[in-house]
Image (cartoon, coloured by chain):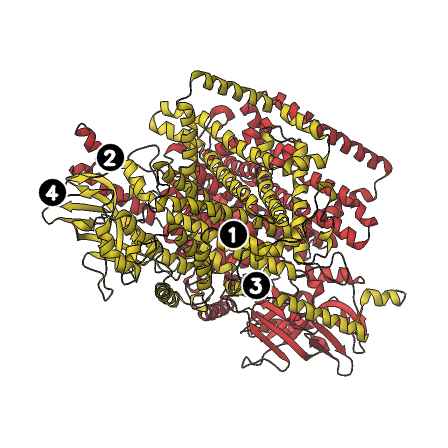
Chain colours: A red, B yellow
């Protein structure tokens, strides 16, 4: 535990809470809890990620970096680290959750390595696994697993990213030769941003509209060889390099286009849609829409793993910056002799500890996402509902965690000043690499809109089968609610209840049920309000309905965010009872409170406008958050230590203890001068001494 | 003017405002207004910045980039572009405002070029100019101006950045040889992060504590040769390369240390402090504290120019992303045939147009800052008060504009999806380079604290000389205020005044005086509240006073931000009457409203908590902002065109019209298929046709 000094240490513990202040945090037990169900896989992956062979080398050219990452992929194969999700009979373990848990830790070594591995085994390989059948697995998976055939996942086109349904590449069946003809009709239909496409890929899973007998059956996936052994494009295939990117330059992203490229009928990955020799199309899923979403749904693991990788990167950033903030001193405040430790400044606590709390929330939520993912993909819990829930959960959490990682990396960078800007201290390169996590595997804003639509659908469903009585009661309660809010009666009630006592107000705010109620109420009220407004849409012509929907787009996305934040808060809260050590649980409860009340503070205007909090209670919120920061300050280092990353993972000179050594050397020098009596006298003092 | 289509176009103009909707924006006149007082210098600099010789080449190694930027600096000298601020008699123009106006435009070519030029002429050269005397000017400026002597500005140390007063390098006067002895006593005192230090610098202006006759006279600046003509370190000088950074890798940042390096007495830049041959120290400024701040104050131009460069980068980012957003289509909403243009989506408008409004506000505020700067440095308005105002203004605006630039670059990057992540489209590299603007030339959080302290001091001054009556009246009014707010009477009054009318509420919100009052009231109330709380500090021991101050640090910084935002809003508002064209003025008034109401929305919780806005009015704010977005949508392209950057400045393929060509090609292809009757029939339709 870090010794607390400086001005911020005042008032750390107030007796008013009636609890014995916790004295220590059990870093090890908390760390174990964070490792989660697949702790073994995570540990193995961290051991790998800490090896110098896999660490990113800053300043490499794009060509050098690409070569290094390609070689590292082979190293992953050799160490047997990337086959967990594949079938046992082919040398895998059928372990889906464990596979992701390990895979996402690779981000610590180098995000390019994580994503390039993700392209090969998580997208290209997983498409063959989930969209193909046993015959395809036997034929292609061994070479994919061994990296004998590196491949691209050719879904996105220059013209269409998140809107996969609108891609324009076609695969037209020719019954005469029993072949599909793959074609790119125009420039916008070129496949784009594909890892492995610029250089390494020998094959690709190409998503194209399947056309047979003059009918367009929508997007399907096809296995298409693209280069020969000498890495020359096969006839009809062309492409170009995407060139330098903002990050992830260890990956050879590129474009592909196809000019009448013929592949055998059996190269259609036909688990969800088959074309017979005569061109007849069949599918186990009758609705083209549901079929499309089922196919895409099998690829949810990309989003799941980005969520986990973003959490891991946030942890690393906080581990580095908190360490530095506990050693670095700057400005004299409480003493003329000694400068203040950065983390004793309130603002610095605000900047780092609130993000630490969010990182914990995101970590617990991610673990639940992994469980859900494993349930579906292991077949243990694999109903349609489970799959939809999994997709919604991933679509909700990935935007929050990836944006949080970018925000955290930037704040940590700034909190370390000029030292934070040096590449050797990790923040800038991690941030540059993770930037694109916000838009790939589904643009964050688009994903949140999907979540919002699901919320609206669920809301509508609740009332679809409701009898008249239920509906009437709902309308009545809504009206009562509105009256209560408009007249501010609820606020007045709170004000009288507190009668000006900050303590009563704090007791209210830190209550778990209060937090849950506030967060839940906001989501349901937002959804209800939007739903009431959009009800008319069904009676409007398409363009007007679209305009109406568009007029609430911002609110919809905000509602989805609120929902996702609630999910994080709930996951955090569910995790608390599993922490056995009382002191640790108390500290983690404060961290949860900091997260929950941080959400309330961020959306405080909503709570006030809608009468959920009185102005008086709202005014105490900031102070209470600052009190939580003071309480957590002594455990800040422990809280990042529990993340379990060692120096081999942090690899940042400013987190190595070098700053403390410099401080000690400087202090010793000053002390020696004072002892010798050779320290120069400050001018002000000299003049005062001279009677000036 | 762009043609508006899609769902967002509904309700663009509502008759309720009683004004004729503006039909066109005078891009040229608005552009001229933005160029400001030093339009000629800005134009010249933009011509330079548009030349391929000065454009950044992505993907260069650090060594190549450094070499290129060094060569570009010579090009700037040859074209006579960087000497405006130097004395006329030495070939300059004594034009301080014009110099910065031009200099900051270089960021468009390459931020490394801007900052490296800033190091040479704006820091190293300006220190000699402002801290030295005529003799120093004659001796050193010509070689600095011609780049014959590249130099470093050696202020920051590894151990001390923003706290310059605590640097540890010493310059001890030796009267026997009439020399200063420069020494670095320990590792933390190494000069660090200095441009020109790793490779190019032949000399440095070194900031060190001046010690003579056993007295420490505080930080002074010394001219110190560091390398010989072969670029080897001179005896006693050492250093190392800072290596790869998160950006600005065209600059050779490095560290320097000094081991008893002797320089002649005359190398002290002694405008504000002189050491006589016998070691006697004299200064025109008696107070060591005031002397220190006066010396630092002469170097304010760094902050001024970062403010302007950040605005320029934001403009470029918005010009690229708005252009793309007006061409790119994605997802079907209002029509089955045509996809929607991105900028017709409400969320996209929120993301880009609100930042466009802030950029305009920052641009107008920057122009006022430049005027203030020129007034002081030309001597036209150069009182102590002017200098303090200038420093406070720079300290207030630079944090806002640099953070805004980072936020804007990131949002624009994401708004362009995968294409935004390609280096060729500029966002990622500009963002990487501008990252450090948030912490150099003064950490943003530290600068805002300076502003806050100034606000508190001004507040205290107001009451220092107040008679008892004034004070009593103030206390009474404060009490009345508190009562009014606690009981929510003000809110109730607003609620009744509006009687539920959104229109009345909107009329209230868009009123200029309302906005001014809301923004001003927030600043003064925050300062008053904090001041009341901190009053006790003067009676407390240092450590307790520090703890009290620290307990309000977050609020202090928020108050400073609110002040800076008000300054931006006021500058924007002052600029409006100077726009002659009525339509353009109307559109720009909307932009100002969007900015002002955006600020109110961001801080809505404060307005509600403190009873300044009723819940009812607050609830209409979001809708009114969305209405402003719809009104501005048709002029979005014009508003970025007015920034005046051509393709030679944007240099982004996605802003070249390529996207529109791709869309047209795809649409033509689809139309041709339909015309030929060869388009495949969607499965759903085929089945419906077959009676399925």
**Label 2 sits on residue:** B286
Depth check: give the residue in front, B279 or A121. B279
Mark number, residue B278: 4
Q: Residues within 10 Å of mark 4 (few under 14, many from 20)?
A: few
Q: Chain of mark 4?
A: B
Q: Residue at x 37, y 41 (%)?
A: B381
Query: Which numbered circle lies on residue B430?
Result: none
Circles 2 and 3 on the same chain: no
Which chain letter goes with mark 2?
Answer: B
Q: Is residue A682 above or below residue B360?
A: above
x and y percent of residue B123 in the render? Answer: 33, 52
Answer left or right for A369 relative to B541: right
Closer to the camera in the image, A85 or B157 = B157
Res A655 visible: no
Q: Does residue B545 sit above or below A240 in this rendering?
A: above
Observer-side mark, 1 or 3, equals 1
The chain carrying label 1 is B
SS at badge 1: helix
The CA span between labels 1 and 3 is 48 Å
Image x and y of residue B669, in percent: 73, 72
Any mark on residue A118, and which?
A: 3
| Distance from Cα at disc 4 to Cα at disc 1 | 55 Å
Image quadrant holding the C terminus of chain A, namely top left
* Image coordinates for residue A642, horizontal then vertical, percent: 47, 45
Q: Does the residue at mark 2 contact the one at mark 3 (Cβ under 8 Å)? A: no
Q: Confirm or deny contact between disc 4 and disc 3 (CB under 8 A).
A: no
Considering the numbered disc 3 on the image, is that residue within a helix, a strand or a loop? helix
Are discs 2 and 1 both within one chain? yes
Residue at the right extreme, as displayed? B691
On screen, residue A38 above or below B456 = below
- Identify which residue is drawn at 27% across, 63% down: B148
């Amino acid at each position: 535990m870090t010794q607390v000094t400086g001005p911020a240490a005042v008032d750390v513990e107030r007796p008013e809470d009636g609890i014995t202040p916790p004295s220590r945090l059990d870093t090890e037990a908390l760390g174990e809890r964070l490792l989660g169900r697949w702790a073994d896989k995570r540990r193995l992956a961290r051991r790998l990620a800490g090896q110098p062979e896999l660490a990113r080398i800053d300043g490499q050219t794009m060509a050098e970096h690409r070569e290094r990452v390609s070689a590292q992929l082979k190293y992953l194969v050799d160490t047997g680290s990337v086959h967990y999700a594949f079938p046992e009979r082919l040398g895998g373990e059928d372990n889906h959750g464990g596979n992701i848990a390990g895979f996402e830790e690779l981000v610590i070594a180098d995000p390019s390595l994580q994503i390039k591995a993700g392209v090969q085994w998580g997208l290209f390989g997983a498409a063959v696994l989930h969209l193909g059948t046993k015959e395809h697995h036997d034929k292609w998976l061994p070479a994919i697993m061994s990296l004998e055939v590196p491949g691209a996942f050719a879904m996105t086109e220059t013209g269409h990213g998140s809107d996969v349904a609108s891609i324009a590449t076609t695969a037209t069946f020719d019954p005469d030769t029993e072949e599909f003809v793959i074609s790119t009709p125009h420039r916008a239909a070129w496949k784009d941003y594909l890892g492995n496409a610029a250089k390494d890929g020998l094959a690709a899973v190409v998503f194209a509209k399947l056309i047979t007998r003059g009918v367009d059956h929508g997007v399907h996936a096809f296995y298409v060889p693209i280069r020969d052994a000498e890495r020359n494009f096969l006839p009809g295939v062309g492409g170009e390099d995407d060139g330098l990117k903002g990050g992830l330059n260890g990956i050879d992203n590129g474009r592909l286009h196809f000019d009448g490229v013929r592949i055998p009928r059996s190269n259609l990955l036909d688990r969800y849609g088959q074309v017979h020799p005569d061109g007849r199309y069949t599918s186990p899923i009758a609705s083209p829409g549901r079929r499309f979403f089922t196919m895409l749904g099998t690829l949810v693991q990309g989003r799941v793993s980005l969520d986990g990788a973003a959490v891991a990167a946030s942890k690393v950033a906080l581990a580095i910056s908190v360490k530095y903030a506990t050693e670095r001193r700057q400005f004299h405040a409480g003493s003329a002799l000694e400068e203040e430790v950065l983390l004793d400044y309130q603002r610095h606590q605000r900047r780092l500890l609130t993000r630490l709390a969010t990182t914990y929330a995101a970590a617990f939520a991610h673990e639940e996402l992994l469980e859900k993912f494993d349930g579906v993909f292991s077949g243990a819990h694999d109903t349609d509902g489970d799959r939809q829930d999994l997709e919604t959960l991933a679509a909700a959490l990935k935007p929050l965690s990836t944006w949080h990682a970018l925000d955290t990396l930037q704040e940590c960078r700034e909190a370390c000043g000029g030292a934070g800007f040096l590449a050797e201290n990790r923040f800038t390169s991690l941030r540059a690499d993770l930037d694109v996590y916000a838009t790939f595997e589904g643009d964050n804003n688009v994903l949140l809109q999907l979540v919002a639509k699901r919320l609206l659908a669920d809301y509508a469903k609740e009332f679809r089968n409701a009898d008249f009585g239920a509906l009437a009661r709902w309308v009545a309660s809504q009206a009562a609610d509105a009256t209560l809010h408009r007249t501010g009666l609820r606020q007045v009630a709170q004000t009288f209840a507190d009668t000006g006592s900050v303590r009563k107000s704090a007791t209210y705010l830190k209550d778990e049920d209060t937090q849950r109620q506030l967060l839940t109420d906001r989501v349901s009220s937002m959804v209800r309000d939007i739903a009431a407004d959009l009800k008319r849409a069904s009676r409007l012509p398409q363009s007007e309905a679209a305009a109406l929907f568009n007029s609430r787009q911002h609110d919809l996305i905000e509602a989805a965010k609120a929902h996702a934040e609630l999910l994080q808060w709930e996951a955090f809260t569910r995790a608390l009872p599993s922490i056995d050590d009382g002191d640790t649980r108390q500290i983690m409860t404060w961290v949860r409170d900091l997260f929950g009340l941080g959400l309330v503070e961020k959306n405080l205007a909503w709570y006030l406008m809608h009468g959920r909090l009185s102005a008086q209670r709202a005014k105490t919120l900031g102070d209470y958050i600052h009190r939580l920061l003071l309480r957590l300050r002594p455990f800040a280092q422990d809280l990042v230590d529990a993340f379990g990353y060692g120096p081999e993972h942090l690899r940042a000179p400013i987190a190595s203890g070098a700053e403390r050594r410099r401080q000690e050397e400087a202090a010793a020098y000053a002390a020696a001068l004072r002892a010798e009596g050779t320290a120069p006298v400050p001018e002000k003092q000299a003049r005062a001494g001279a009677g000036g």
